[in-house]
Image (spheres, coloured by chain):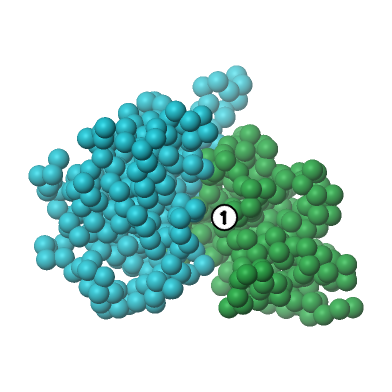
Amino acid sequence: MTDPKILPDVETLAARISDGAKLAIFKDNGVAMEATRALIRRGARDLHIVTVPTSAFQAELMVAAGIVGTIETSGVTMWELGQASAFVRAVRTGAVRILDSTCPAIYSQIQAGEKGIPFIPIRGLIGSDILTVRDDYKVIDNPFGPNDEADPIVALPAIRPDVALFHAPKADRAGNVFVGGQLELKTIAHAALKSYVTVEEIVEDSLMEDEGSGGVTIPAMYITGIALAPKGAWPLPMPGYYPGDIDYLVRYCQAARSEQGLAAWLASEGLGPRAAPQGGSRMRTAAE
Amino acid sequence: MSDYRTEELLIEVIARLLDGVENIAVGVLSPIPGSAAILAQSRAGGPENVRVSVIGAKLPGYRTDGGIDLFDQAAQGRLGAFFLSGGQIDGAGNINLLGVGDYPGAEARWSGSFGSAFLYSLVPRVILFREEHTPRTLVEKVDFISAAGSNAPNVYRPGGPHALVTNRCLFMFDKARGRFRLESVHPGESVESVRDNTGFDFECPAEVPETPAPDAATLKAIRQDIAPKIADPYPKFAAEVLGYTAPGRAAE
């Protein structure tokens, strides 16, 4: 029996993610690229993306296609291929609002969301200008510190993403999702109000019954919708399935250096330009 | 004396800075620190004595339980050494990974601060590594402090800068003064060439020695033993710099 949360296709999944949603995405081996392209094709807008804790091509492409209003991140880079050009341009021109953070802060904020607590303290950060530009990050006195001695410590607000979106190796018919070594995906799914997942394959046997896979599987209760998407992380790698498509990413980086080159690249990939007017809209789609 | 590359000298310099550290983590885009960590591990007698985690490596021995685990290790004091860099590094040890000009990067915008604001405060021996040593990179004051070089005395701060390694010299960080001290200049450089290319003031002893070159045994270890290990996740570096191509992988 197939659980109704297994959706017919990636387009259906992307239609369920509302404009303006706070959308958590993952840094590496769990990147839902086909779903990202589907979000762009459906003309999503004004997303608030939270990169947990960084992002490469996924955030870059979302910004390039104009579907991001706010980006909350510790870093966006194409790593050894160079800078994320569309991200850099959008931040410098103010086309997207940036909330600069640091990796363990975002992880901790997601963990606070997972625990249902309003904030979480974290060591470090004091002296960093991140605290200057983030007025939602506060320095408090450790209430359990030694008497008569201030112990300043940073307090961070919890993050409960509206939606977590990621790609995983496999799901079963009951809607359990195997994440293997990508343990942070469990944390993200726990924190998010809804989790949409694309998978390389859907298996007939329960992933929960086997002790080996059960421990590295997200229970179906945290999963809102699943779509089958073979090669769904392409052009990024999916360990055990396929390597990254470096040539494709190099071609993207070259095209994205100029706005004209980027526009031509997006058009050739069927990802733009959008017909609708850009920016600032808070309209919701009827999808949810 | 055998010929060696600057990268091999830097591997030797960093490996010496790691002497005595039991748990070393190496972040992304760091083939030279990664090689140095594996060399330090080998000199200390192997993985039984020194644990090395190379982020991005698929080899099981170099993996952690993921990003959350790595930062938790740092916060608990389990991590002895880490590496950071900066688009700008200033004389007080502040580093800037974010951009130049008014926030968020009026003149240049880089990728972001990553884990620096946290790890710099908590890992006891943070080694700053920046090959380009010019007044553009080593500045009097950074435009944005991604991570601060020091804190007020009442701030919990077990970690911080230990040294700054560039392609011209080795600086050690004087925690009491909060400034760098010139420790040695690499072969071909001088105190003057270092001063001319540094945008900040630093302490300079009357006599500054030359950085010792890697000996023949070290070069052999780097090329024969370290190269195959750092080829995951840095195949290009292993091939182009250390002359190693993994079996079954065509040279590019």
Residue B218, image quadrant: bottom right
Residue A109 in view of the camera: no
Q: Chain of mark 1?
A: B
Quadrant of the rendered image containing residue A150 = top right
At horizontal 28% and vertical 53% (from top left) the residue drawn is A35
Q: Amino acid at mark 1?
A: Gly
Q: Is residue B9 left or right of residue B136?
A: right
Which residue position is annotated with label 1?
Answer: B56
Check the image and report above or below for B69 versus A198. Answer: above
**Residue that appears at 90% across and 78% down:** B1
Q: In percent of the image, x 20 and y 52: which residue is there?
A: A11
Residue ID at (39%, 44%): A170
Residue A205 is left or right of residue B236, and the answer is left
From the image, which quarter does the C terminus of chain B lie in? bottom right
Q: Position of residue A91 (x, y in %)?
A: 34, 61
In percent of width and height, residue B139 lies at 58, 66
Chain assigned cyan = A
Color used for chain B? green
